[in-house]
Image (spheres, rainbow, N blue to C red):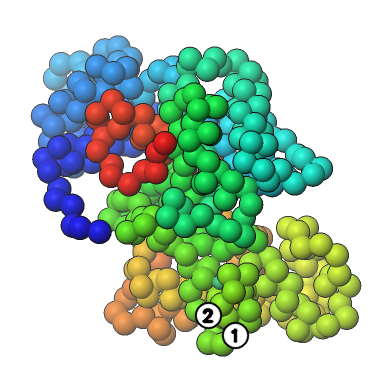
Amino acid sequence: MAVARLTSRDIRSESRLVVMRALLAAGDSTRNELADATGLSLATVSTIVQDLLKYGIVAETGLLAGTVGRPSTGLRVNADRGRVVGVYVEDRYLEATVFDAALGELATIEAVSDEPVQEADDVIDWIVRGLDAALERAQAKRDDVLGVGILLPGGMQRPVKAEPVASAIWLHLDRLRDRLDLPVVIDNPLKAIATAELWLGAGRRFANVVAVSLGFGVGAGIVQDGAVVRGATNSAGEWGHSLLAFEGRRCQCGRRGCVEAYLGVRGVRQTLAETDPGHPLTEGPDTFGFLEALVDAAEAGDAAAIATVERTAEFLGAALADLVAVLNPEVIAVTGWASAPVFHERMMPIIRRRVLADSPGDAAADLAFEFPTRCGMDGIAAIALERYMRDLGLVTTRVIPAL
Ligand SMILES: [Zn+2]
C-alpha cells in the first residue's frame, strides 16, 4: 500500500474524533473542559464543536454558571440523533443490539437456530430479521438508524473458508446491502474490541492498549498512539496465530505451534488431555462450559485441573510477554475465559516475571491489566457511528470496510 499523505483535512478529522470521544467520556462538558481534556486549543475545539452541532451529533445543554468569568454552554453527545445497531452472527447464534447515538445500549435480542444457518440468503435473512426484532424491542424505526455494524471474522481480501457464515456474507456483500437498505459497515472482532477500548474503555486513559480476546479463537485488538492498528489489509492483531511453540501443536489454521492451539478453548482442553488422558472433562463438546467446569474442578482440588490451569497460565504469560515486547502497551485488557479469577491470580506473576525478564528496558515496569466489560458489540457500534460521521464529511478515516 502506498504511503497516504496526511492532509490538514485528515488532521481535522482526527481532532473531531478526539473531541467526540472526550465528550462521550465526560458525559457533560464545556468547550473549555474539552480543550483541557484533549490538549487542543480552545479555538480548535470551538470550531469542531460548531461542526458537530451543525449536524446534530452534539447538543447544547444550556448555560452553566462558571466559578470564574462568564457562564459557559454545556455540551453533550446528542443521544437522540439516531440509533446504531450492532450485529454478531455465527452459524447457530445471532445477537443484535441497538444503541443510541451516544453509544448507550437500548435493547438487545438473541436468536438461536437448531440447524446451522450457512447459505448466503438464509444468513442475510436472519440478519435482517434480527435487526428488525432488535429495533422493535428498542422502539426504534428504521428511519432512525444512522448505521449498522456487523461483526464478522476475516476481511474483504481474505474470506474465511473455515467460517461458513463469514464466507457467505463476505462473498455476497451486495445482496446484504440491498436487503438491509441501510448504511452498513463490516469489521472483524479484533478491530471492534480495539475500537471499544479506544472509545469507551482503557483508551480513554491510555494511548497504548492491547485488548486480548480469549475464546475459541484468540486474538488481540491493538490501540497504538490513540488509534486502532489495522495493518495494510485490516488483518493486524492475529496474535492467536503467532508462534508459541516451534513445531508445536497443530492449530485450526493448519500451522503448528500457534498461540491459539494452547490458549483457545480447544487448546486448554488438549493441555488437560495431555496431563490426564482419562480425565472426565476431556469428554463431550468443546464449550465455554468446559472452562467453567475446569475452574470449578481446580478449586475443588482436582490435581489434573490445577496442573492444567497452572500450565495454561504459563502459556498465557509467555504469549502476552511477546505482545508486550513488540507493542509496549500501557495496559492489557483481557476478555474471555482468562478473566476467571483463578487464571488471573496465577498468570499475573508469570506475566510480570517474563515480561521483565524478556523485555529490554522497562517495557513492563508500569504495565497494567484490566478485565473489561466492554465488548466487540460496543466497538462495532462505535465503528458504525464513525462511518456515519465519515458520510457527513466530518471524518476521513481511510480504512473502514463499509458497503
Ligand atoms: Zn493458527
Residue placed most toward the observer, 51 or 296? 51
Q: Position of residue 126 (x, y in %)?
A: 66, 33
Q: Quadrant of the N terminus?
A: bottom left
Q: Is residue 387 above or below residue 197?
A: above
Which kind of residue does numbered mark 1 sit on? Gly
Q: Residue at x 40, y 83 (%)?
A: 358
Q: Residue at x 49, y 50 (%)?
A: 188
From the image, tell me which residue sits under label 2: 244
In the image, taking residue 254 as reference, residue 39 lies left or right, namely left
The Cα atoms of the two marked residues, 1 and 2, are separated by 8 Å
Quadrant assignment, res 346 = bottom right
Instruction: State the SS at label 1.
Output: loop
Tag 1–tag 2 contact (CB < 8 Å): yes
Q: Is residue 371 visible?
A: no
In the image, taking residue 282 as reference, residue 386 lies left or right, namely left
Quadrant where ligand 1 appears? bottom right
Q: Position of residue 96 (x, y in %)?
A: 61, 33
Q: Quadrant of the C terminus?
A: top left
From the image, tell me which residue sits under label 1: 248
Which kind of residue does numbered mark 2 sit on? Leu
